[in-house]
Each structure stands twice: as structure tokens, then as C-alpha cells.
Amino acid sequence: MEKNVTRAHNFNAGPGALPLTALEQAQAELLNFNGTGMSIMEHSHRGKDYDAVHNQAIALVKELLSVPEGYEVLFLQGGASLQFAMVPMNFLPAGKQAGYVMTGVWSEKAYEEAGKLGKAFIAASAKEGNYCRIPAFDEITYDAASAYLHITSNNTIYGTEWQAFPDSKGVPLIADMSSDILSRPIDVSKFALIYAGAQKNLGPSGVTVVIIRRDLLEQANQNLPTMLKYGTYAKDNSMYNTPPTFSIYMVKLMLEWVKAQGGAVAMEKRNRQKAALLYDIIDASNGFYQGHARPDARSLMNVTFRLPNQELEKKFLEQAKQAGFVGLNGHRLVGGCRASIYNAVPYESCQALGDLMLAFQKKNG
Ligand SMILES: *Cc1c(COP(=O)(O)O)cnc(C)c1O
């Protein structure tokens, strides 16, 4: 089928690219959802049309991430940033402490929030070397009495990612998976709680997905405002109040696309091909392109690299912009360039970027 839309090569770090088919379906249904003569945005969240969308989205998260029995999938607002506070509010009681593995800016923010609400300690840190690696499992301090251990599975700014997850030795493991959820299969049973702002790998901004083990809900602090208790969301199927209906609808469309592609296994295969294409160019460039992440910690989602000097970086970014590439500027804490290649970024966009990198080096190397 011929598509007369010109889509940008979108390497934005977040919100990220969405699948074309999901956008097209949203467009087709925008004025008249399901023959109702209304947009899904205009439907009551208590009506059967929205209810079906909501439950399909939850079912797809469960199916695609193989969420085992005994877990709840919740939809919250406030982004991953509110989770930085809700996790300790609910699960860090006085007299206990929580461990944080520091692998980047988002870990630091999570740790700082916990410190305002209770006692947090640094269980391991990769700060030395500007977060270019992930700590080895044996660097992590496991305090068996601690409330939980918090990790950030993918470090969006630095371009590092946990390649495997630690056995937290009975301590509940909590992960911020905002920038790599559903980019590969994971063993959810290793985690007590997973949270992710949807806007990188699951859909648009406005909704945060939380996967939580039910027994944890029972241990949560009950003495909290209603909207800050996970239990409120679990009890009412994330509909205690009005949920972000349009965002959840878009998540459903994106998850249907993931499913049609072959699910988490297919996502990982595709993501590995996309990332390898760029890392291979970096590695074969004789140092013209230098990756920030240590090779054993490289992210499949955020490829961070530098050029020989800032002048060339500026020139490269300028040419990329001219050629229609979006979002390649590195974060100011790392500098250089960053290509965020989330689930919905097509292989063809990575190929086009690879071609640009090769041509640029040939001319300027
Ligand atoms: C983007 C991001 C955040 C911040 O998410 P918000 O939804 O904007 O609060 C937190 N953690 C990670 C790993 C991220 O990539």
C-alpha cells in the first residue's frame, strides 16, 4: 500500500517515535470510535467502549511481558518521576533502609527522592567514569534487612543498560524500566515492582505503567493520600478516578503493533539489529566515532557517541538536521550525539543514520 506521508527519522530521547500503523489507526478512529460517533477521548471512562480499551491494554501488557500470576498491571499518571517518590512512600518504612544502584541521572533522582522520605543508601555506583558502565553484581551491597533494592534498567542519558539482572537475595527488586520496557523479554518474576513512563517504548506521555507483585501491596504504607497509594489503583482496576484515557488507548494501539511484529522476542531481535548497525560503524571508525558506554554495558535503546572535537560534532548535527534527522543531540551531561532507537524507530531510520555517519567520516575523517 502506498503511503503518501513523509515521516521524519525520529531519534528523540522521549517522547519517542510511535509506530505509523498505530498513528494511522488513531487517525482513522479519531472522529468516530467504534461507530459511536465520538472520539475515544470523548467517551466516559465508565462506559463499555472505553472499558474494553482499558482492559485490552492491561491484557496486552500482561501477555507481551509474560507477567506471571500474582502481579497487577496498573496505569498511573505523574511519569516515572512520581514513581521516584511513590516507591519510598509506599515501601520504605521508618526503621528500614532502601538500596539504590547508581547508574545515571535517573537513578540519582530516584535516590534523592527516597532520601527525602526515608533512609536510602547507595548499594553500588558507576558514577566514576561518568556512568559509562553498569556495576558488576558482586559490587552491589545486599542488605538482607533492607526494604528494597532499586535499579534503572536502561540509562537513557548515558546509553548503558543492564545486560542481565541481579538475584537480589530475597530483597524486593524494584526497577525503573522507562527507557527499555518491552524492548526485550524479561523475567518479571525477578522483580517486586517495575515502573515505566510510557513515552519511550510503550506509547505517548501521560501514562505510567506499573507492574507490582500483589504481596507487596499488602505491606504498603496505608497511611497515605489516596492517589499516592498503589492499592488505590489495584483495587479499582486503575479507575479510581479518571485515567488518561487517550494515552492508554494509544498504548493499546502500540502494543497491538508490538504483538503483530512478534512480541518481545521479535522486538529484541529487531532492536539488536538496529543497535548493531550503529555500534559496528562506531567500532569500525578507527576512533572517529567514540562510544560513551563501555561495550559490555551498551544500551540497545540509546546509542551515545562523540566525534573527534566539538566543531565536528556541531557540523555533524547540523548536516543531520538538514537531512531530516531529529533528536540526535547528546544530553548536555555527556555531550556529543545520542541516537534513541526505541521500539518504534524503524530499521530503515538506523540505516539512514548509519549511511550519514559513514559519509560524514569519509569527508571529514
Ligand atoms: C525519561 C525517564 C524518566 C523520566 O520520566 P518522566 O515520565 O518524564 O517522569 C525516568 N527514568 C528513566 C530511565 C527515563 O528514561
Image (cartoon, grey):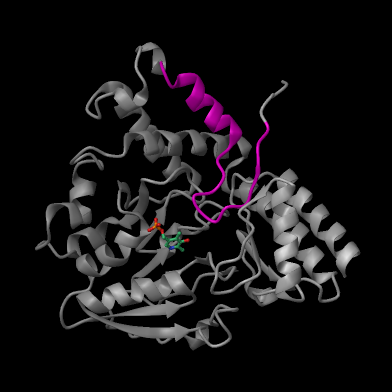
Using the rendered view, name the quadrant where residue 365 is placed.
bottom right
Left or right, 249 with respect to 219, comes to right
Q: Is residue 228 visible?
A: yes
Q: Nearer the viewer, residue 151 or 16?
A: 16
Against 243, residue 318 (above or below) is below
Q: Is residue 234 left or right of residue 137?
A: left
Q: Taking the image as four quarters, which one is ligand 1 found in? A: bottom left
Extreme residue toward the right, this view: 362
Residue 115 shown left or right of residue 56 in the figure:
left
Asked whether 271 or 357 is in front, the reply is 357
Left or right of 105? Residue 3 is right
- What residue lies at 35% left-to-right and 71% top-to-bottom? 110
Residue 147 can be seen, yes or no: no
The magenta stretch is 6-31
Which image quadrant is residue 354 in?
A: bottom right
Question: At which x and y percent is residue 41?
Answer: 33, 27
97 and 324: which is toward the camera: 324
Where residue 90 sits: x, y (%)? 21, 65
Where, by quadrant of the figure, is residue 204 drawn?
top left
In the displayed structure, 254 sits above or below 337; it is above
- The percent coordinates of residue 269 (x first, y second) are 68, 51
Residue at image location 51% in from the left, 38% down from the top: 254
- The relative height of residue 295 versus residue 61 in the rendered view (above or below) is below
- State the count of labels: 0
Q: Position of residue 334 (x, y in %)?
A: 58, 74
Find out whether residue 50 is within the magenta segment: no
Can residue 28 be found in the magenta stretch?
Answer: yes
Q: Could you tell me which quadrant the N terminus lies in?
A: top right
Q: Residue furthest left?
A: 223
